[in-house]
Image (cartoon, rainbow, N blue to C red):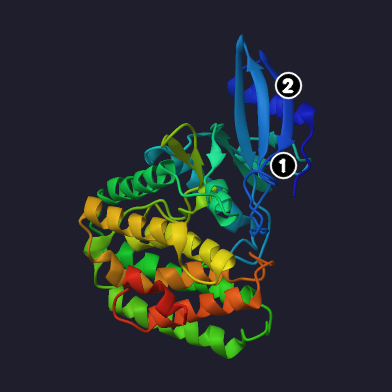
Amino acid sequence: MPTLRKDQLQQYLRDRFGPEVALLSYKVIGKASSKGEQKRYGYGAPVKLTFRLGRRLQSAVLETMRPGPFGHEHMADRAQAILWDYDSYGRLPRHVKALDVGAFDGTQALFSVAEAREFFVLNEWAEGTSYHLDLERLAKGGSLRKLDRDRVGALARYLAQIHATKRRDSDLYKRRLRELIGHGECIMGLTDSYPKQYGFITADLLRTVEEACNRWRWRLRDQAGRLSQVHGDFHPYNVLFRAGTDFSVLDRSRGEWGEPADDVTAMTINYVLCSLIRWGKLRGPFEALFRLFWDTYIEASGDKGVTGAAAPFFAFRGLVVASPVWYPNLTIDVRRSLFRFIENVLDVPRFEPDRVNEYCGI
């Protein structure tokens, strides 16, 4: 990965924003604030830049993407993702805005893309606290507050709002389902990242999950009317809350359009995970928030079909949170419950939110 130097960063900022720019500081963020006690793996290390533009103090976040096994092996893979970030961030309500896109040359100077070796995206700085900290507080025995419920309601209604924007494109809906199975960041990329055997998690088990997910792709592929504006990676680490229910979202991923169940499952699997870690089952505050999210979303969106599309997306998110790469500190019992959840959800025609513990084999 490129090594950042103050003189090169300042020159880039002056080229982009004007000669009066003075870079005051730059530092890596996210190692403590954007990754919780369980999550360890990430695609890059964002850097906060603080600079003076005339009389105005401004902050921005410079993000790169490191090579890795989740479809990011080639420079072109990483360039595609970053160029898409720049193109799409500004079109999603509440998403932080991308200010610029550029690249590093062979000497690691930052400038235009003609001689690019690696790409970066510069986003606006958004104040706030990662939503995963709310869940960590509850996992450590904190009481369920009215604000916790209000924030769940705000998140569910936000998804209903963005999902209300539809697009008629049957080929694109099929592609998004195809990418759910075969994209390096999704199901096959995850199963390939698991160790050859990890306790009860064997190659046969992972292959069985893949095959079941592909059967679901064939069930869903003709439901193109469901194609909607999506975030694409709507989990607690990509939500920043400020006072009350005011929030911004970060790092929408993989596609501007997709299946609404992707966003709903991406968030709600985290209530299941936190509760399994804390109690070995879905109960207490996490059960309340899980049910509230689903009830609020279905009421606000009117999308009763989301439960009929959720299974392969829950499998995808389940493979993430059960992964020894992404979540190395889980107990084998928690991983076993997550895999039971994956297998059982894939085996029923429609996901039922009140049956989570049954799906987990509890």
Which corner quadrant of the image does residue 122 belong to?
top right
Give the percent coordinates (x, y) of residue 336. Answer: 57, 80
Q: Which residue is mark 2?
A: 24
Q: Picture coordinates of residue 97 (x, y %)?
A: 48, 34
**Residue in the foreground of this view, choosing between 248 and 116:** 248
Q: Is residue 348 left or right of residue 242?
A: left
Q: Tell which of 299 and 83 is nearer to you.
A: 299
Type of amino acid under label 2: Leu
In the rendered image, residue 180, in percent from the top left (x then y), is placed at 44, 69
Indicate whether 208 appears above or below 100: below
Q: Vertically, is 309 above or below 112?
A: below
| Callout 2 crowding tier (Cα within 10 Å): few <14, some 14–19, many ≥20 | some
Which class describes the residues within 10 Å of circle 1: few (<14), some (14-19), or many (20+)?
Answer: some
In the image, is 209 to the left or to the right of 62?
A: left
Residue type highlighted by circle 1: Asp
User: Which residue is tagged 1?
Assistant: 105
The number of discs equals: 2
**Dot 1 or dot 2, earlier in sequence:** 2
Is residue 185 at least partly visible in the picture? no
> Which callout, 1 or 2, points to the residue nearer the camera?
2
Residue at the image position 66 percent from the left and 15 percent from the top:
19
Numbered mark located on residue 95 in the image: none
Answer above or below: position of 31 versus 68. above
Q: Is residue 337 visible?
A: yes
Identity of the residue drawn at 55% across and 72% down: 280
Verify CB contact (< 8 Å) between mark 1 and mark 2: no
| Along the viewing direction, whichever of 162 and 83 lies nearer the viewer | 162
Element assignment for label 1: loop
In x, y percent, where is residue 132? Answer: 55, 50
Quadrant in which residue 123 is drawn: top right
Q: Which element carries disc 2, helix, strand or loop?
A: strand
